[in-house]
Image (spheres, rainbow, N blue to C red):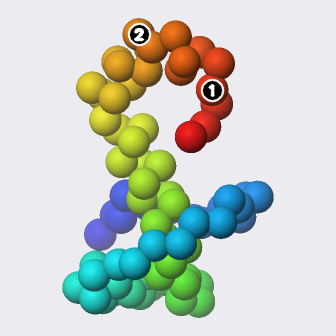
Amino acid sequence: MKLKLGPIVDDKPVKVTLELPASLHRDLTAYAEALGREESHALVDPVKLIVPMLERFISSDRAFAKSRRGSPRAATSGSV
């Protein structure tokens, strides 16, 4: 099995607080376990999966990429 996420990279964080539905947290935990088995390393904290999953989702959204190319703000802002 090949998961969409690869190794989790540490980066300078921006603090965000959010609440997740319990079912989503269970899914994140299961994904973290599967990633740990695939990468043959220790279990990743499920919360650390949120950022790469969001990045992957955003980078694969063609409509979003097209809208950013056409937006004058996109040319000056590197992140949200």
Residue at point 37% right, 58% down? 4
Image coordinates of residue 37 in percent, x first then y, are 44, 84
Quadrant in the rendering for residue 53:
bottom left
Residue placed most toward the observer, 33 or 23: 23
| 73 in relation to 24, above or below | above
x and y, in percent, of residue 67 in the image: 35, 19
Give the left or right position of residue 46, taking residue 63 as reference: right
Residue 27 lies in what quarter of the image?
A: bottom left
Mark seen at residue 77: 1
Characterize the local packing of mark 2: few (<14), some (14-19) or many (20 or more) Cα atoms within 10 angstroms.
few
Q: Secondary structure at mark 1?
A: loop
Q: Which of the labelled discs sits on residue 54, or is there none? A: none
* Residue type marked 1: Ser
Q: CA distance from mark 1 to mark 2?
A: 13 Å
Tell me where residue 54 appears, x and y as whole percent.
42, 54
Instruction: Count the labels in the image.
Output: 2
Which residue corresponds to mark 2?
70
Q: 38 or 30, which is in the foreground?
A: 30
Q: From the image, which quarter does the C terminus lie in?
A: top right
